[in-house]
Image (cartoon, rainbow, N blue to C red):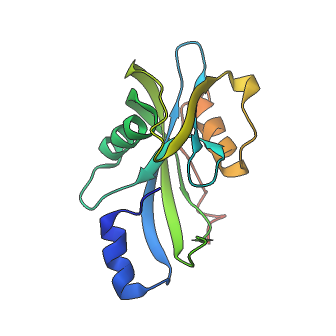
């Protein structure tokens, strides 16, 4: 996945040091309960679509843009499902990042699933009981978006830190 220009400009100053970034993730749930996933071009794993906020961009607008770019599907964010600080991560080139992720539950409103070959190798709908193997972080986001109570999940203050 291409690195956004603003991140490349910051890397000119900080090298591989840890960057704090804001990410958005979409759990797109169809009327029949199907969940939209894409197989990422960077690591080949199935995941929910999403990306990094550009400077000045609103989270919901970034999410709508990212989902369409990666999957061809148009979505409407319905609610925030979770807000979580993820552990630091090091990319193969040595760049270190840490994301605060805002996961939205979304509904599809148009478009057609397609892989863009830049960020997605495959795009498909999956029944909730037939999801492909994914990492725990992605499964957690899906569980929060599917929660019937509709409450936003976050790490409680007494457990944080």
Name the residue: 45% across, 55% down: 23
Name the residue: 27% across, 62% down: 55
Q: In terms of depth relative to the viewer, which is nearer, 13 or 100?
A: 13
- Residue 156 shows in this picture: yes
Q: In which image quadrant can residue 34 be found?
A: top right
Q: Position of residue 161 (x, y in %)?
A: 62, 72
Please, is residue 114 above or below residue 7 in the view? Answer: above
* Side of 96 where 12 appears, left or right: left
Please, is residue 12 above or below residue 103 in the view? Answer: below
Name the residue: 36% across, 56% down: 53
Q: In terms of depth relative to the viewer, which is nearer, 157 or 84?
A: 84
Name the residue: 56% across, 75% down: 93
Q: Position of residue 40 (x, y in %)?
A: 57, 46
Q: In which image quadrant can residue 122 be found?
A: top right
Q: Position of residue 29 (x, y in %)?
A: 54, 25
Instruction: Return the residue found at the far top.
Output: 32
Please, is residue 91 above or below residue 82 in the view? Answer: below
- Residue 36 shows in this picture: no
Q: In terms of depth relative to the viewer, which is nearer, 8 or 154?
A: 8
The mark tally for this picture is 0
* Side of 118 where 124 appears, left or right: right
Instruction: Return the residue found at the far left.
Output: 56
* Side of 56 where 126 appears, left or right: right
Q: Position of residue 44 (x, y in %)?
A: 64, 48
């Amino acid at each position: 996945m291409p690195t956004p220009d603003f991140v490349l400009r910051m890397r000119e100053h900080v090298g591989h040091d840890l960057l704090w970034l804001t990410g958005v993730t979409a759990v797109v749930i169809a009327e029949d309960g199907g969940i939209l996933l894409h197989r990422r071009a960077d690591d080949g794993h199935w995941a929910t679509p999403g990306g990094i906020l550009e400077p000045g961009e609103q989270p919901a607008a970034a999410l709508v843009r990212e989902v369409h770019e990666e999957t061809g599907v148009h979505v409407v964010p319905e609610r925030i499902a979770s807000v979580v600080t993820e552990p630091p991560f090091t990319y193969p080139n040595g760049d270190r990042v840490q994301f605060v992720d805002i996961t939205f539950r979304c509904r599809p409103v148009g478009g057609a699933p397609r892989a863009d070959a830049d960020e997605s190798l495959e795009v498909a709908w999956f029944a909730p009981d037939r999801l492909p193997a994914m990492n725990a972080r992605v499964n957690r986001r899906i569980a929060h978006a599917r929660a019937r109570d509709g409450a936003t999940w976050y790490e409680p203050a007494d457990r944080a830190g």
